[in-house]
Image: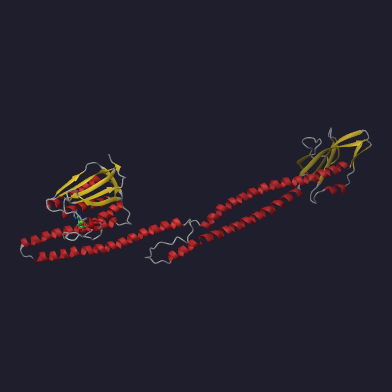
Amino acid sequence: MTRLRSLLLRWLLVPTLSLWALGFVAGYMRSLSQAHEAYDRTLLGSALVVSERLNMADGEVVADLPYAALEMLRTDAQDSIFYRIADLKGGRFITGYEDLPAPAALPREEPVFYDAAYKGHDIRVVALAFTVVDGAEQRPLLVQVAETMDARRQLTWRIVADAASVQLLLIAAAAGLIALGVRQGLAPLKRLRDEVRARGAHDLTPVDTRTVPREVAPLIHAINSHTERQRQLSEAQVRFVANASHQLKTPLTLLRAQVGHALMQIDLEAMRGVVSRLHEATDTTGRLVGQLLALARSEPGRTLEVEDVELTALAREATFEMLPVARGKGIDLGFEGSDSLLVRGERVLLRELVANLVHNAIVYTQERGTVTVSVGKRAQCATLCVVDNGPGIAPAERARAFERFYRIAGSQTQGSGLGLAIVKEICDRHGVDIALVDAPGGGLCVDLVWSCEIIEAQ
Ligand SMILES: Nc1ncnc2c1ncn2[C@@H]1O[C@H](COP(=O)(O)OP(=O)(O)O)[C@@H](O)[C@H]1O
Ligand SMILES: [Mg+2]
């Protein structure tokens, strides 16, 4: 895990220090050229003073340069000063330090400055042309004055070091401020951590995002919505367990009673009758268990196992599975639809959806009635309709029919009131619109329309 503070410091300090180093080099060069400018003027002054002391005597050049005069020319106590006088033309050495390096090009009106090495020192030299006059004779001379560069370098270092140390102090202060800022910035997160730590295991209420920095809010929102899903899931599970045990109690008590009743029969024929009712009752109980499981699967909060489902084939299978029930009542169960229609969804749930609708249609339609399931397309959207010619559901009851455990008064005894609630929940989870409408023949028409995202299979 990276610490935000060291990450920030690293990302800010490393570039700043690199910039500082670059600035240091650039500053040194600039200061050195400024020091040269200042010291060069003094060096030129010295060369002019030396020139003024050159005279002609008996046709020879005489330099009146006692040691004290030279001492005066030194700009700095540590620097050494050298000079050399020679003929400008011909270059004959006259006086001074003979081996002082000569300029690359002879000076004319303007003096020439250049760097050189002499006696193991780096030196700065000025060379100028000076003419001594003796009566009619004019003698152009080359005057060179040089000094070591210690003073210049020291001045440069002093300037640069002063500036750089101030900058370093500023950078250190900025680093301190950044560390402090990060600490302050993270304080709300620490508060949040303490708040979350102090929570009880069952406290799944959302964390307050008002006190956290705006950048962190999306993270807290995401965690909150995750927690909310967890809360829904655990609530749903609690609800499911309560409902399931409640719903299973009745048919199990009934089964137990019937088994007891069967055991008391002495006559085999009578026992056969009880066992056959027992058989029906186990069917109903099995159905109820299936419905409860479907309910648990379709609860909001649980992630669906979505895949491409071929709706026509699935609906056809689920419909024809009910054939035995339909036959038992002499009901004409039909299926319409042949186009291949792919929808996204959880196969088990979509099957349960069709099964519940068809089962209802068969159960609530009078004997020898008609139930037709049709799958098709409406404006590119997949549709599924279950139409019967039974009693239908009165418009006032239609909304309530979707509620869990709601059964319309007078409905036949088998049933738990869960079928349509499951259908509605599965529709909601799959983005399917469901409507209960009057069938043309007077019965009920359950009309499902998928949101228009079907993928054409062929
Ligand atoms: N096809 C239908 N025709 C008439 N009534 C229906 C039909 N389907 C459902 N119903 C009514 O809606 C009520 C709720 O149905 P459902 O949720 O499946 O519960 P259950 O079938 O267990 O009673 C039923 O009690 C029934 O009265
Ligand atoms: Mg039902």
Question: Where's the C terminus, which quadrant?
Answer: top left
Q: How is the image coloured?
A: secondary structure
In the drawing, does residue 81 fall left or right of residue 217? right
Q: Quadrant of residue 107?
A: top right
How far from the left and from the top, in percent, is residue 247?
Answer: 22, 63
Q: Residue at x 17, y 46 (%)?
A: 334
Q: Is residue 343 or residue 58 the one in the foreground?
A: 343
Q: Is residue 246 or residue 79 the one in the foreground?
A: 246
In the drawing, does residue 199 fall left or right of residue 5? left
In the drawing, does residue 3 fall left or right of residue 115? left
Does any portion of residue 310 appear in the rendered image? no
How far from the left and from the top, in percent, is residue 40?
Answer: 78, 44
Count all numbered tags in the image, as a single digit.
0
Whether 450 is drawn above or below 265: the answer is: above
Whether 143 is drawn above or below 214: the answer is: above
Q: Residue at x 33, y 61 (%)?
A: 234
Q: Is residue 90 or residue 12 the one in the foreground?
A: 12
Q: Is residue 271 or residue 231 the one in the foreground?
A: 231
Q: Quadrant of residue 240?
A: bottom left
How far from the left and from the top, in percent, is residue 302?
Answer: 32, 56
Whether 448 is drawn above or below 251: the answer is: above
Quadrant of the rendered image holding ligand 1: bottom left
How far from the left and from the top, in percent, is residue 180?
Answer: 56, 60
Does any portion of residue 219 appear in the rendered image? yes
